Each structure stands twice: as structure tokens, then as C-alpha cells.
Image (cartoon, rainbow, N blue to C red):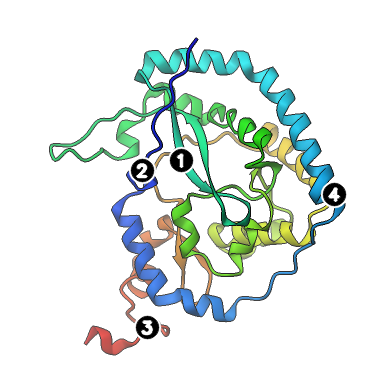
């Protein structure tokens, strides 16, 4: 079967204007303060394990995974062709190690339906039933093994985020890119998850990984990942932008777009009303 690749598309086609507008407001209101109060990151360093052994494991295990999952990917390719037509793959620009962007390929699971003005409908309106099934069972993640094999990603590490998110991050949280992004980075300490809202806890967990990365850490994370996949969850198949990182609140804590559904939080962080980081005279 000949697989046709799609052209690389701008990520903002699937990130709503509302999310971008919220991010701009948070960057203006709070990013400088978030940088001022952020603690320094103590990188574990370019050890022999990080430079050679970890990469060797990535090549060997991802190569084996590509062989094992080849039949599944062929089935996915065939059904995707029937479901949404050609091309069957699309690329998303993600930020990799050293802040270098790369393209993450996935099987298409949305149509190209537009409204009367020619604008794409929301992701939730365009995703197909097959696409929801693929997402719920994480089959859309299988092509990530190719990104690991070619060196853009690692098996274990912080999840690669859309390139649009990078400029919204504090200098502390940009340090998550001192290492290759990974398929998944389970929570090292659940106290981190319980202490903050999810967006901030996820970034702080990534920093914990950067500061403690070693063979022992990766083995422990691998076992946590196995437990998470088989024992705890299936993905929801959500396609919206509520989970997208948009910036920081006035206390320097990371926010997702969904957090801003709280009216009081929106008033403070987006409108700048009662926000100590914002000059109130600007609203007079």
C-alpha cells in the first residue's frame, strides 16, 4: 500500500482563536512575573547514560516496536483511507530537544469540513467515529515510535508540545527541552499532581525528570508507564483545546485553557481586573 503524506499544516488551524487570544493576554499580564519568581533548574547533566546508553535503548526498542506494530499500522492506514480519504497522514510541528522544532506524524481522524465562511469547524465537529476509537485506544500514538527511532524523541521524557506553546513558557519550564521529548513522562511524585492544577503539575514533573534523569529513573518511569496504560486509563478521545497550555496566572502557576472557564479566574488573569501584575490605569 502506498501511503501519501499530507503537506505540513500550520498548527493554528487546530488551535482555536480563543486559545491564542487568552495566551496573548496571559503573556502580557503574567509571564514576566513568572520568570522573576521561578527557581533555577539543576540539570542532571550530559552523562554517559544520557548521551549514549539512553539513545541506544531508544533505537533498539523503538525499532522492535515498529516491526511489531507494522500490521496494526497497515490496518490503520487502510481504514483511514476509507474513513477520511487521502492523504492519510498529517504533521504537527512540535518542539524538541534544544527548542528545535520537528514534525510529529499521525493518522488523520478528522474531515476538512468548513462553515459557511470557509473556516474549519471545531475539532469535536470534524472527528469521525473511527477517529474517536483510535484516540481512545491510543492507536494514534503508534507512529511516535518512528520519531523515537529517528532521534526526534525518546521513549521516556516530557511530552512534545506544539511549537506555539514555547513562547508562552517561563524560562524555568523551557528547561524541559534540555532532553529529548518522550512518549510519556508519568508523574514521579504524586504529591506534585495533588499540589497544583494539572498544567503546572505536569511542567513541574517534567522539571523533576530533567533534574533526576538516569538509568534508574527511566526504568522506574517505564514501569509507571506500563501501570498507567494497562491499569489506570484509556484516553478520552477529546479533541478540544481545553487542555492546551495558555500561560501563567498572577502567582506564576501554569494554566490550561479549560482552567479559564472559571469566571473569577478569567476576570483576573485575562481581563487583568484585580491582577497585581497589571497596571489598573490601563483599564480606566
Q: For the residue carrying disc 1, how many other residues have a C-alpha within 10 Å: few (<14), some (14-19), or many (20+)?
A: many
**Mark toward the start of the polypeptide (2 vs 1):** 2
Outermost residue, bottom direction? 281
Find the distance from the CA under tag 4 to the CA under tag 2: 37 Å
**Mark toward the start of the polypeptide (1 vs 4):** 4
**Which numbered circle lies on residue 14?**
2
Spot occupied by residue 130 in the image (x, y as percentages of width and height) = 42, 21
Going 52% across and 74% down the picture, which residue do you hit? 252
**Mark toward the start of the polypeptide (1 vs 3):** 1
Q: Which dot, 4 or 2, sits closer to the camera?
A: 4
Find the distance from the CA under tag 2 to the CA under tag 1: 10 Å
Q: Is residue 152 above or below residue 88?
A: below
**Mark toward the start of the polypeptide (4 vs 2):** 2
Spot occupied by residue 92 in the image (x, y as percentages of width and height) = 46, 40
Q: Is residue 143 above or below residue 49?
A: above
Where's the C terminus, which quadrant? Answer: bottom left
Q: In this rendering, would 109 be left or right of 126?
A: right
**Mark toward the start of the polypeptide (2 vs 3):** 2
Q: In this rendering, would 263 be left or right of 131?
A: left
Residue at the spot of label 3: 278
Residue closer to the observer: 41 or 148: 148
Amino acid at each position: 500500500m502506498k501511503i501519501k503524506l499530507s503537506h505540513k499544516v500550520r498548527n493554528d488551524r487546530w488551535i482555536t482563536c480563543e486559545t491564542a487570544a487568552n495566551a496573548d493576554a496571559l503573556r502580557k499580564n503574567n509571564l514576566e512575573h513568572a520568570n522573576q519568581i521561578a527557581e533555577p533548574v539543576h540539570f542532571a547533566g550530559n552523562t554517559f547514560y544520557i548521551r549514549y546508553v539512553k539513545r541506544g535503548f531508544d533505537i533498539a526498542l523503538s525499532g522492535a516496536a515498529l516491526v511489531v506494530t507494522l500490521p496494526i499500522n497497515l490496518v490503520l492506514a487502510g481504514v483511514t483511507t476509507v474513513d477520511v480519504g487521502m492523504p492519510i497522514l498529517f504533521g504537527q510541528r512540535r518542539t524538541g530537544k534544544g527548542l528545535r522544532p520537528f514534525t510529529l506524524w499521525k493518522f488523520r481522524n478528522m474531515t476538512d469540513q468548513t462553515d459557511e465562511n470557509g473556516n474549519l469547524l471545531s475539532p469535536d465537529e470534524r472527528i469521525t467515529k473511527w477517529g474517536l476509537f483510535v484516540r481512545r485506544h491510543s492507536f494514534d500514538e503508534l507512529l511516535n515510535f518512528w520519531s523515537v527511532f529517528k532521534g526526534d524523541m525518546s521513549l521516556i521524557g516530557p511530552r512534545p508540545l506544539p511549537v506555539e506553546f514555547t513562547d508562552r513558557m517561563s524560562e524555568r519550564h523551557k528547561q524541559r527541552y534540555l532532553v529529548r521529548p518522550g512518549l510519556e513522562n508519568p508523574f514521579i511524585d504524586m504529591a506534585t499532581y495533588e499540589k497544583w492544577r494539572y498544567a503546572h503539575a505536569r511542567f513541574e514533573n517534567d522539571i523533576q525528570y530533567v533534574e533526576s534523569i538516569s538509568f534508574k529513573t527511566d526504568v522506574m518511569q517505564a514501569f509507571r508507564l506500563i501501570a498507567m496504560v494497562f491499569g489506570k486509563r484509556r484516553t478520552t478521545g477529546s479533541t478540544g483545546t481545553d487542555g492546551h497550555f495558555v500561560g501563567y496566572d498572577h502567582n506564576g502557576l501554569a494554566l490550561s485553557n479549560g482552567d479559564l472557564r472559571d469566571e473569577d479566574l478569567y476576570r483576573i488573569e485575562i481581563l487583568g481586573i484585580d491582577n497585581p501584575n497589571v497596571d489598573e490605569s490601563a483599564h480606566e
